[in-house]
Amino acid sequence: MDEPLEPKDDELVARTKDGDASAFDDLVRRYSPRVYGLVYNMTSNHEETNDLLQDIFLKAFRSIKGFRGDSSFYTWIHTIAANMTINFLKKRNRRRGPSLDDIDARIENDPDYIEATAKTDPRREATLSELQKKLNEALQKLSHDHRAVVTMFDIQGMPHAEIAKILGTSEGTVRSRLFYAHRQLQNYLEEFRAP
Amino acid sequence: MSEELSDIQKLIRLKRYEQPPEDYFDDFLLEFQRRQRAEMLQRPLWQIAWERANLWLEGFRVPALAYASILVAALGVTGVIMNSQTQGSAAALASVAAPNIAPAAPTAPVATVSSSAKLPPSYILEKRPVSYNAPFSF
């Protein structure tokens, strides 16, 4: 028996505009994990991410009547998230310490993880938490704009064109920011790279 | 160089394994619904009116700059209405105040022109019929 088809984003948006708040709940359910990933990897703090995520979806709900559908809902909600997170980071006076999420145990089977830990000094085996700490420190050293691009491209796997639309910039700018960010990260993560 | 970059990308990609607790997104939605419903109940009237006006204008596909001219026109019309109301009320005030300012008129007899004008024509008889008087007196 076929599963009932999930309503498309456009349909959910139209229903929300007509006053059906439960349709927006479906959009929140659908996009909160991805938007969480963007905000969390930019702030490296779970509590701040949670607060921002609430504000982002509330803002989207308030402004949805102005959403004309020129871009996809996916792009639109990511644009709101990226702008609000970058503004939040600019205004944040004193950086709170990181509050990192747990790492999924499946990482231990990931070939990239195995390769990365194997490349470290054999006399001092890198632990999982050490790798996590290093990765977060390295990301936090990037500027907000560079971190946004690295998060969307490297962690979330978005194409350059989509990132350019979300950030309201050109694909060329996205590529150059990525190039610069990767060069910076090389220095911070030297010990995990091949000798 | 590209191999080095690829190493970095592989490392950074491992961050996708950092995940919030399993039931986090269910709790998140519940909290969102609570805040969303609370906000919907607390919206000021002007905000609802503004939103509806915007929606109504959207139906006409009005260009962005037209909003400014509509606002100016609306302000102009409001100004004209308020001005005419002010003048009207001034005139009304003047007409109400006029009898108080004018000198008091002498009290009119019972049968006056003004009061009789409103009534059907009536004929006032002399106190004594003419035929009862002597036509001539010598």
Image (cartoon, coloured by chain):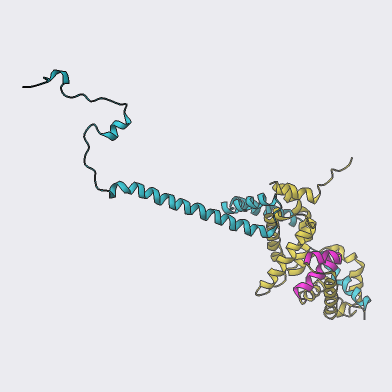
Q: Residue at x 12, y 20 (%)?
A: B135
Height in image: A41 above or below B55? Answer: below
Residue A193, horizontal then vertical, whole percent = 89, 78
How many marks the image carries: the answer is 0
Height in image: A181 above or below B52? Answer: below
Q: Is residue B21 in view? A: no
The residue most toward the front is B138
Q: Is residue B98 magenta?
A: no
Name the foreground residue: A68 vs A106: A68
Name the foreground residue: B80 vs B112: B112
Q: Is residue A149 magenta?
A: yes
Q: Is residue B65 in view? A: yes
Q: Colour of chain B?
A: cyan
Q: Residue at x 27, y 48 (%)?
A: B102
Q: Colour of chain A?
A: yellow
Which of the 4 quarters of the picture holds residue B12? Answer: bottom right
Name the foreground residue: A121 vs B135: B135
The residue most toward the left is B138
Location of the C terminus of chain B by quadrant is top left
Q: Which residues are magenta?
A: A142-167
Location of the N terminus of chain B by quadrant is bottom right
- Give the main secondary structure of the magenta stretch: helix
Q: Residue at x 44, y 53 (%)?
A: B86
Q: Residue at x 21, y 24 (%)?
A: B125
Query: Does A36 sit left or right of A106 as displayed?
Result: left
Which of the 4 quarters of the picture holds residue A168? Answer: bottom right
Residue A81, horizontal then vertical, whole percent = 74, 63
Residue B108, horizontal then vertical, whole percent = 22, 37
